[in-house]
Image: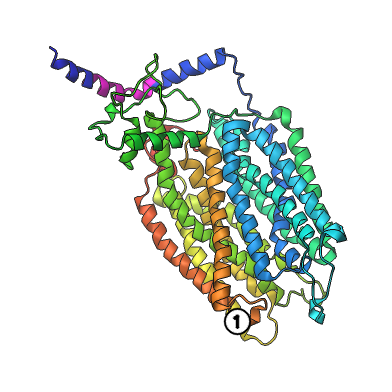
Amino acid sequence: MDAAKPQDQEQERKASMETKAVKVFSSEEEADSSEEDAGEPVQNHRGWKAMPYVIGNETFEKLGTIGTISNMLVYLTTVYHMQSVSAATLLNVFSGTSNLATVAGAFVSDTYLGRYTTLAAATISSFIGMVILTLTAALHSLHPPSCNPKGGEQCQGPSGGQLAALLASFFFLIVGAGGIRPCNLAFGADQFDPRTADGRRGIASFFNWYYFTFTVAMMLSATVIIYLQSNVNWALGLAVPAALMGASCAVFFMGTRLYVRVHPEGSPFTSFAQVLVAAARKRRLPLPDTTSQLFDPPHRSKLVSKLAYTDQFTCLDKAAVLAPKDALCADGKTAVDPWRLCTVQQVEEVKCLARIIPVWSSGIVYFVVLTQLGTYTVLQAAQTDRRLGNSGFQIPQGSFVVFNMLTLTLWIPLYDRVLVPALRRVTGREGGISLLHRIGVGLVLSIVTMAVAAAVEHERRRRSAPMSCFWLVPQQVVAGFAEAFASIGQTEFYYRQFPENMRSVAGALYFLGFALASYASGLMVMVVHRTTGWLAQDLDEGRVDLFYLVTGAMAAVNLVYFLACARWYRFKKSDDDAAGAGDIHLHEKASANSAPV
């Protein structure tokens, strides 16, 4: 009789595993009802009623900051009289720090403030930064005196106080970017109820509108605002974006009474640390023979789906092994010491991040390509004929990014409405191709972008007279196609592959890749300039075409690395999923009877 008890207990555990889904839903309902009884208000999702304020805030914010930053290289070299290499390095550091700050912003949002408060503070900070930047152009005491370098006049660089004012504006812009970038997408999605079909459709439509307004704002910034900065004066050209940033603040706060405010649920970074510490403390324990020996209490969250167990990174499973020293609370569902015993759900969330990191790291080199192209296209444009016919009008050298954005604006609806349905009929996949395929296509196009840019620069150097600026359009168009596949593919990939309570982290991870790419780009520029002299102040004396080829070779090696990572990757699956999110076949989606987020 005693010998049969362990076998009976093992059978009961297996039966418990098989009926887990039923228990999860019942435990969720009990937990939710208890929380509501405790006085937590029921969220009233206003959906599209809140969107004019959310999207209006984001549109004005992009109009206020994106155009200014894209033309900042011209400002630093013409108004502050910096050398092009020094200005490019400073902007790479600024861009990298802005994107790196998104990690801190995601942490503060998820742990302490929530997305609404974080966005409110960040929007105000960006407005202050734009006001200070405007003052550096409007007040003569805050920038070096004007000069005419083409006439042989020696230009004076910025003083310590002038540089401090410039860096102060950058500081407030960095704080603003750190809060806005990881939270704005997630905050917009918070306004829809993901438990209803209308809410899920609303979330999908919101993403479409988000990218549409992004590209429209980019085009307006790269044309109207940059024209004011380059052809009228910098004081007005910076005052207009500052005013738009002020409008962004006003529009955001006007919608306050309509917003759904999701309260912080605790930092996922703490949960990550607990899993790593617990697995390290139990590193000498043997792995269990079955998953039934892991600590897997009923899942009580209605927001976060229960992740299915995976057999990758099994060393992390030790964090969920019930050892003799592990004690549970009276309810039997909570560990007394969460730094020694974690749940299977916590472990699987860390595994999600561990699987994503290799794919994410391959995106860093792609961002390096975008960064280098954006910087040196501006310098290339300065040495081309930018006149439109005989009108005497010159296209601002910082405006060529508009061709990139125009390609995005025209291609995305065509891709979504024509190409995806056609591919869907062939492949049977919901998105036509998987997200990893989409990213891979973008990486291939990034290599083509560098090859085209090198060929155009080689042709520019070969000519004795300045060539037409429209020779720069093909590399921008190919870069736009690459971004439509790789950048948007990465954003959606992170959004779908992270657990729901880590969506701010997903947004931060995308911009963290940008941050590291900016630092790497700055380091690459310095090393190449000092060792080869290819990046001279006068492009005719340098070899930017060879620099482009080196960047393209790096992108080609990175593509091989990405293919290896993609082949190894496993898409996230919940307990009730037939397929991993982001790799859904139509018959599997129909059987699940649910719409994608």
The answer to which image quadrant residue 111 occupies is: top right
The answer to which image quadrant residue 138 occupies is: bottom right
Magenta-span inclusion, residue 21: yes
Where does residue 504 sit, x and y in percent of width and height? Answer: 56, 39
Where does residue 406 sit, x and y in percent of width and height? Answer: 65, 59
Residue at 56%, 12% in the rendered image: 37
Residue at the spot of label 1: 459
| Image quadrant containing the N terminus | top left
Residue type marked 1: Glu
Q: Tell which residue pokes out farthest to the bottom in this image.
A: 464
Q: In terms of secondary structure, what is the magenta stretch mainly? A: helix
Residue 408 versus residue 312 in the image, above or below: below
115 on left or right of 328: right
Residue nearer the viewer, 86 or 438 = 86
398 on left or right of 315: right
The stretch of residues the image draws in magenta is 11-23
Residue at 54%, 49% in the rendered image: 510
Residue 61 versus residue 254 in the image, above or below: below
Where does residue 70 sit, x and y in percent of width and height? Answer: 69, 60
Secondary structure beneath dot 1 equals helix
Residue 166 versus residue 46 in the image, above or below: below
263 on left or right of 402: left
Query: What is the tally of numbered marks visible in this picture?
Result: 1
Residue at 80%, 49% in the rendered image: 131
